[in-house]
Amino acid sequence: MPITTTFKLHLKWDSSAWSHFCSRIEKMGLKELENRSIYIIREVYAEFERPAVLWSTGKDSTIVLWLCKKAFFGKIPFSVIHIDTGYKFKQMYTFRDRIAEEWGLDLVVAKNEEAMKAGVGPYL
């Protein structure tokens, strides 16, 4: 029996369809992948009322942020959300703040103050 995953857009993928999709991705060049990503970002912006992008300040989410910037010719027209756990290196916060200022981001920093005060963290 094939494994089936249902995506939010009501598309069903069985394991053979997923395998075909992955093999097509592997054959695409970097420019085509970038163009498809930009297309998807623009479609999301056009179809949804209040899109936002999550940014951890790590390499992967920073690339997504850069693609969003490229998709809208240098200015991201929606909020960028950073979930601040309080457990990042000081340099990462400096990087976040510098990029937010340089790129003119609508940066929303979210913290769970109650959990932080209670000492909840990754080392429990």
Image (tube, grey):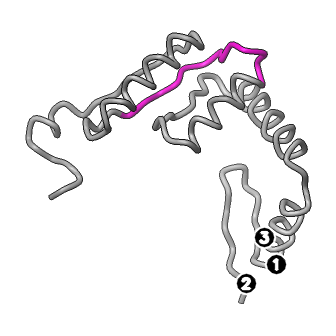
Q: Would you call the spot at circle 1 few (<14 residues within 10 Å), some (14-19), or many (20 or more)?
A: few
Secondary structure beneath dot 2 equals: loop
- Image: magenta residue range: 71-83
Q: Which mark is residue 2?
A: 2
In this orientation, which residue lies closer to the viewer: 35 or 45? 35
Contact, CB < 8 Å: mark 3 with mark 1? yes
Contact, CB < 8 Å: mark 2 with mark 1? yes
In the image, 37: left or right of 124?
Answer: right
Q: Residue at x 30, y 30 (%)?
A: 90
Secondary structure beneath dot 3 equals: helix
Judge whether residue 96 is colored magenta: no
Alpha-carbon span between mark 3 and mark 1: 5 Å
Judge whether residue 79 is colored magenta: yes
Secondary structure beneath dot 1 equals: helix
Q: Residue 32: where, in percent of width, then height?
A: 90, 44
Mark with earlier residue (2, 1): 2
Q: Residue 110: where, in percent of width, then height?
A: 34, 27
Q: Residue 59: where, in percent of width, then height?
A: 56, 42
User: What residue is pinned by disc 1?
Assistant: 16
Q: Residue at x 19, y 30 (%)?
A: 113
